[in-house]
Amino acid sequence: MPVGNHPPHGETANGGPLKRELGERHIRLMALGACIGVGLFLGSAKAIEMAGPAIMLSYIIGGLAILVIMRALGEMAVHNPVAGSFSRYAQDYLGPLAGFLTGWNYWFLWLVTCVAEITAVAVYMGIWFPDVPRWIWALAALVSMGSINLIAVKAFGEFEFWFALIKIVTIIAMVLGGIGIIAFGFGNDGVALGISNLWTHGGFMPNGVTGVLMSLQMVMFAYLGVEMIGLTAGEAKNPHKTIPGAIGSVFWRILLFYVGALFVILSIYPWNEIGTQGSPFVMTFERLGIKTAAGIINFVVITAALSSCNGGIFSTGRMLYSLAQNGQAPAAFAKTSNGVPRRALLLSIFALLLGVLLNYLVPEKVFVWVTSIATFGAIWTWVMILLAQLKFRKGLSASERAGLKYKMWLFPVSSYLALAFLVLVVGLMAYFPDTRVALYVGPAFLVLLTVLFHVFKLQPNDASRGAVRSAS
């Protein structure tokens, strides 16, 4: 991993800096779209099985923790909006090794996630076109999303906006239709269904507090991607306005879309039957008389997977670009063309091609092991955001703290509570055999990165080291 001489932060050897072309509507929809993955449309059945109707509590608790994490990231991003975001903040406030580990870990995390999403596109396209080999759809998804990212950041923002809008409109339609079934008996011969299913099958919390705790690990992974807002800070038109607006809306929108959708689903169907007869979304729309419900939801799931892949390619490209600027990746990746870090994006796209190939060649068990790095990586990223923010605050004078444009609530108590919550989630991962492998593979990957860091002496360059201080 040779490195060379690096330009000052925000400048590139050719092509100029990244362009600030992401508007407020792009970033707001990206923030929400990143939270709504394929899992919600397919029923969140596994998590519901663990907690029953109390799964809604798990999403609220997890949502509160994410709100604190995002608020911490927002405080730093508004103060110093740079490409690389939390990797850059980890470097400047926690040290070069922390920045290196966070950046490369996040790059790999999204690489693995993108491979899973591309595979999902292939699987669901196969429902409509069973005779077409799956690899063709996987390749088509990668080429199309890769091309969008290579054109311009505005093209990425536009596609992400519409992808997110499709998911949001679908959820709103399902929630409103479900309320019609619950309150007015739509699709049920005019007999209002009510919400008694929330407590008549073993109670609201059928598996007790243990069930809620057990579901937390799965719920938190549903939130992976929301930190992508921080990566947009270097390309937002008005980061001091758009970043706080996007972060402030995340929690309430999570409540509306996740908790609202689950409230409707769990009211209409007994919790212990969900997942046994297909997607609750499909069943709800069919109950309302929409015969093409399965096709509609299939389309939405495909757009949800494409959206995640689109965001993942964006994230990996920007993170690699930032690492190269910091002297922790080959200098060639710090170059841009028309404001787009195309070399960094092309490496990520090429790595994804190998990932798609591996996904079909290696046994599924091996792929689950690789994916476990991504799940561990999500926790690592959030912990680094919180630790960097604590150190960031410590380095400010009283007048600088008073002058912060966007502040963490109840600091430092909120930051420490969120950290304690993430430690609890890691403990839960260690408790269950299915997720315990993440605690072997994840730290092993970090150890490998640490060895590479020391062997290649990947210290950030002087210009990079001074960037945050000068920005402050």
Image (cartoon, rainbow, N blue to C red):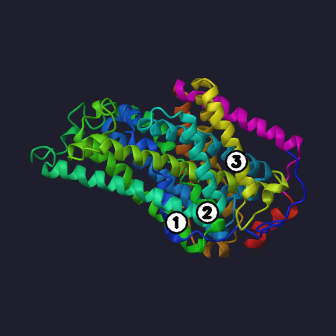
CA gap, disc 2 and disc 1 = 10 Å
| Of residues 12 and 232, the one drawn nearer to the viewer in this rendering | 12
Question: Main structural element of the magenta stretch: helix, strand or loop?
Answer: helix
Q: Is residue 388 left or right of residue 122?
A: right
Q: Nearer the viewer, mark 2 or mark 3?
A: 3
The residue labelled by disc 2 is 232
> Which dot marks residue 248?
none
Q: Secondary structure at mark 1?
A: helix
Q: Is residue 320 visible?
A: no
Q: Earlier in the sequence, mark 2 or mark 3?
A: 2
Residue 412 x/y as whole percent? 57, 58
Instruction: Identify the magenta region.
Output: 433-460
- Quadrant assignment, res 438: top right
Examine the rendered structure and indicate whether residue 200 appears above or below residue 40: above
Q: Amino acid at mark 1?
A: His
Residue 3 x/y as whole percent? 88, 51
Callout 1 crowding tier (Cα within 10 Å): few <14, some 14–19, many ≥20:
many
User: What residue lies at 41% left-to-right and 38% top-to-bottom?
Assistant: 128
Q: Earlier in the sequence, mark 2 or mark 1?
A: 1
Q: Secondary structure at mark 2?
A: helix
Callout 3 crowding tier (Cα within 10 Å): few <14, some 14–19, many ≥20:
many
The residue labelled by disc 3 is 348
- Considering every residue shown, the one lying at the far left of the view is 190
CA gap, disc 2 and disc 3 = 18 Å
Callout 2 crowding tier (Cα within 10 Å): few <14, some 14–19, many ≥20:
many
The residue labelled by disc 1 is 26
Q: Is residue 130 left or right of residue 105?
A: left
- Badges 2 and 1: C-beta atoms under 8 Å apart? yes
CA gap, disc 3 and disc 1 = 23 Å
Q: Amino acid at mark 2?
A: Thr
Q: Nearer the viewer, mark 3 or mark 1?
A: 3
